[in-house]
Amino acid sequence: MKRRWHIKTHMLVTLIGLTTAILLIVALAFNLAVYGFIRSRVSAQLSGVSQNAADERRDVGRGPAPGQDREQTQQEYEDPSGAPEQEQDPQQAPDEGGAESFDGRPDRVMGTRGSAVLLNADGTVFDNMHGDGAVAEALSSWYRERVCVDQAASVRNKLVFLEDGTYVVSAGEDPVTEGKIMLAYVDVTSVMAFTQLINVVLLSVILAAILISVLLSRRFARSFAEPVRKLSDFAGEIGGGELEPREFRFRDVEFDALAGSMNRMTADLREAKQKQEVFFQNVSHELRTPLTSIRGNAEGIVYGLMEPQDAAKVILAESDKLGGLVEDILFLSRAGKEKRDAGVRELDLREVFSLCVSEQRAEAEQKGVCFVFDFDESPVLLKIREQDAERMLGNLISNAVRYAEKEVTLRCRNETDAVFFAVEDDGPGVAEEDLPHVFERMYKGKGGRHGIGLAIAQAAAQSCGGAITARNDGGAVFEARFPCLGGEPGIRDGNRHSSETR
């Protein structure tokens, strides 16, 4: 099971982790770039120092000219033109060790100094050359402790940490005297100190950024978690049956939109609950009437107050009415829940109309109502469950017969992109205030029976992608359109026939 986190904690950890990771990556990239730059420049500088020191050793190895001492020879090497030495600017710091030939390179790293020391085979100092004596002795001690004479060639650009500083060292054989070792080095103490200072600054920036991210994330998490908590409490109230809308004022547009959606959902649920209560009340009333009649006639038979045969006929009729009502209620309860393609097949609506008319013919003849057919000559096919089609058209025809004065017109045809049918009567029509509600469950207009017949017809139409509409045109007109099978065009209005029958 996954560990559950509070939103505040989750956002806090995520933001801090992300900030720290970004800054650490920046610090690592900076250090790699700086060390790469310093290493390449120091390596070039160290190579130059080694070359200069080797050149000086070769010049010294050739020996001074008659009348010249080593100092004079070195002076000529440092200034081959033989020009007299100019007076040094008192504001300019003297060059320690006189190593101008070692440090005057254009690729020298600022803050570094390069020099060389000549060692004996046992690692002791033979010649300090231009370097500092203390540094020479320290490097000599390091060489004796860490490097064997046979491994002198392996010392290339090696970083050495001594008590008095940090140096990059390269070792090689003396080009003049066999058995001597030349150790060239560059003092990078100031560069390393500067790099460490930058790392301290970066660490401080990281810590400050973490602190700022903590403060910001806490504030941001609080502004995010509070609306979620309020909306969660509201959802709990809805789940508990409290369907009263609540007013929220959030700064975030998304939370405000969610609160509006929840309030609209609450209003819809409240309306649905009210309709459900009315529906159950009406159903209870409709069920109570036939049950009361059945019970009364049964008691009449038991106590000898009614003729058994007459009472039995009433009981049978009321039982049929009760059974039909229960079937209608069950149909409505299943509407939209069954698989749409279950039991669906192509039906010719003309045949379904004819079947439903035959079932309603006795009642129509009793009222003196005739049927007028306005059908296409070609089949009018619709994909629908047979039971749905019979209930849809049967309820519409039954409703039309109930209100018709003399005739009921049935239309059924193929249109260019739809299948159309209509059921019309010549009665008084539907009251204007009832028109918006005629398809609602248990809504009974003037002269209605149970209030679910038209709701069943609408549910059946919607199950196959259509919808029934109601309007008045002399009498009531109920018409519907459905998409054609496979999108094929239907037969136009000119190819129809009409007939009238009683």
Image (cartoon, rainbow, N blue to C red):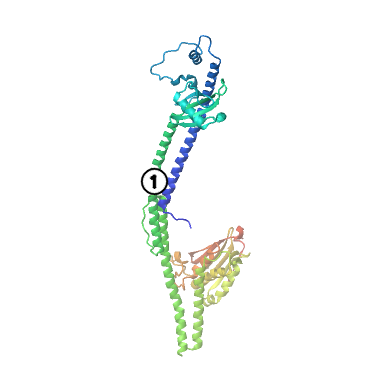
How far from the left and from the top, in percent, is residue 376?
61, 64
Residue behind mark 1: 214
Name the residue located 39 percent from the left edge and 52 percent from the top edge.
225
The residue sitting at the top extreme is: 67
Q: Nearer the viewer, residue 164 or 391?
A: 164
The residue sitting at the front extreme is: 122
How far from the left and from the top, in percent, is residue 260?
40, 55
Name the residue located 39 percent from the left edge and 56 percent from the top edge.
229
How far from the left and from the top, in percent, is residue 6?
41, 54
Question: Quick one: label 1, few (<14), some, or many (20+) residues within 10 Å?
Answer: some
- SS of the residue at dot 1? helix
Please say whether residue 275 is visible from this viewpoint.
Answer: yes
Q: Nearer the viewer, residue 254 or 1?
A: 1
Quadrant of residue 149 within the rendered picture: top right
Name the residue located 45 percent from the left edge and 23 percent from the top edge.
133
Quarter containing the C terminus = bottom right
> Is residue 300 placed above or below 378 in the rendered structure?
below
Tag 1: residue type? Val
